Amino acid sequence: MSEIHTEHGHEGHAHEEHAGLDKKKIWQVFAILLVITVIEFFIALWVLPKGYMSHGVGNFIYIALTLLKAYYIVAYFMHLKYEKVGLQLALTLSFIFIIYFIVLMLIEGDYLHVHMPFK
């Protein structure tokens, strides 16, 4: 019987930790994501075709804006912002190493493709 009371006590405590995500915050995050998406479309459909920006700079801006959107989605809608700092760091470092290794494999694969053609 005491185990049931203990479990309910933990559920209430866990709910209080995530209480910061109310309707107002959800709409605020939605608005931020919408503005970022509009900026991306503006760059893709008007700035790059008119030649106001090089494609290299455009790609860099796309990557930066996409990472910013990914942060907001993971932080607020997947509740990572409300987790302990240790878990946040572990997930962030893992993600950075995965991206780093993918980039290294692509660079190495391109090098091998150019310098060691297969017959």
Image (tube, rainbow, N blue to C red):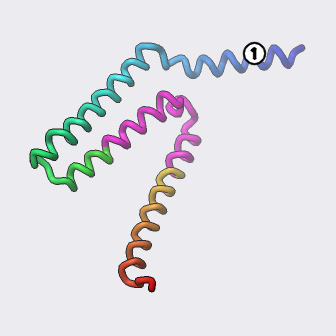
Q: What residue do we see at 50% from left, 31% from top?
A: 81
Q: Is residue 10 magenta?
A: no
User: Quarter-wise, where is residue 40 in the image?
Assistant: top left
Quarter of the picture holding the N terminus: top right
Give the amino acid type for the residue marked by disc 1 in the picture: His
Element class at badge 1: helix
Q: What residue do we see at 47% from left, 28% from top?
A: 76
Question: Observer-nearest residue: 83 or 32?
Answer: 32
In the displayed image of the protein, which residue is found farthest to the right?
1
Residue 97 horizontal/vertical position (percent): 50, 57
The answer to whether residue 78 is above or below residue 49 is: above
Residue 44 horizontal/vertical position (percent): 22, 42
Question: What residue range appears in magenta?
Answer: 65-93
- Residue carrying label 1: 8
Left or right of residue 57: residue 68: right
User: Quarter-wise, where is residue 87 in the image?
Assistant: top right
The answer to whether residue 109 is above or below residue 25 is: below
Residue 100 horizontal/vertical position (percent): 45, 60
Left or right of residue 117: residue 36: left
Left or right of residue 15: residue 7: right
The answer to whether residue 31 is above or below residue 80 is: above
Q: What residue do we see at 55% from left, 45% from top?
A: 91
Q: Is residue 86 magenta?
A: yes
- Secondary structure mostly seen in magenta is helix
Question: Observer-nearest residue: 18 or 119?
Answer: 119
Question: Observer-nearest residue: 12 or 55?
Answer: 55
Residue 74 horizontal/vertical position (percent): 48, 35
